[in-house]
Image (cartoon, rainbow, N blue to C red):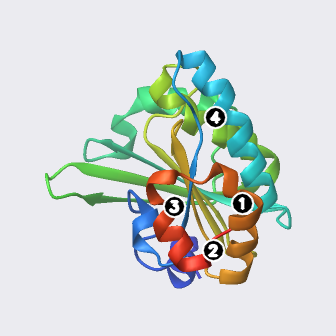
Amino acid sequence: MKLKDSIEKIFGKTAFDHGIFYNYDYGLRFELSESGDPIGMFTVAYPKAMEIAQEALKNSSEIQICWTFYGGGNHLSSLSAFKEFFDLGIKIPEDREIWAEKDEEDLFRHFILFTVPKKYLKNVIWGALAQDLDIRPRVVGSLYIYCLTTEILLHPYDDRGMDLIAPNKEYAKDLFIKFNHYLLDYDRAAMESAYGRF
């Protein structure tokens, strides 16, 4: 089975969408950075995101990464985005899946999906959080982190926050309790409705 099909079987057709927290009944949304200058925001956000991600993926040896970005009709039209991605130190393996979709505004959204050892988690988190702060290296676009063996989906959407989806509600509840102090207050009511008050 293709990686894309496996991901959609576990997480549904919305597993590559923007704002994935709002697509699931049992999502978690974590607040990462705080106000301040870019370096200060990044140095607050990165350790938080890594702490959550390492706990969520502690039973995994490899992760699936989906890098998405907007560009021309061919994904290779965005060479500058590829250069920035390669600066993160992540080599896209030959065994990968590539596709593109047109959005409502007829813009091409490209997807590159592949599997890497979990040791690259730190690079992926770094790239995702650095993008809007103009810190290098960074990623242009979005990065989604999946673990098919433990059924975890992480989307660090920028330095402000990260979404976590786990179909196993009990596993997600453990993370809800452990990282309750990191939950985004704006969406706390929705999460407490799913998992209870803590």
Q: Quadrant of the C terminus?
A: bottom right
Please tell me which of labels 2 and 1 falls first in the chain.
1
Mark 4–mark 1 Cα distance, whole angstroms, equals 21 Å
Q: Amino acid at mark 4?
A: Ala
Q: Quadrant of the N terminus?
A: bottom right
Circle 2 sits on which residue? Answer: 166
Residue 76 - label: none
- What residue is rendered at 15% in x and 53% in y? 106
Q: Residues within 10 Å of mark 3 (few under 14, many from 20)?
A: some
Q: Position of residue 179 (x, y in %)?
A: 72, 56
Residue 52 is left or right of residue 196, and the answer is: right
Q: In which quarter of the view is residue 13 placed? A: bottom left
- What residue is rendered at 54% in x and 35% in y? 159
Mark 3–mark 2 Cα distance, whole angstroms, equals 17 Å
Circle 3 sits on which residue? Answer: 188
Circle 1 sits on which residue? Answer: 63
Dot 1 falls on a residue whose secondary structure is: strand
Nearer the observer: mark 3 or 2; the answer is: 3
Mark 3–mark 1 Cα distance, whole angstroms, equals 28 Å
Nearer the observer: mark 2 or 1; the answer is: 2
Circle 4 sits on which residue? Answer: 45
**Relative to the observer, which residue lies in front, 67 or 144?**
144
Please tell me which of labels 4 and 1 falls first in the chain.
4
Nearer the observer: mark 2 or 4; the answer is: 4
Q: Position of residue 47 (x, y in %)?
A: 74, 36
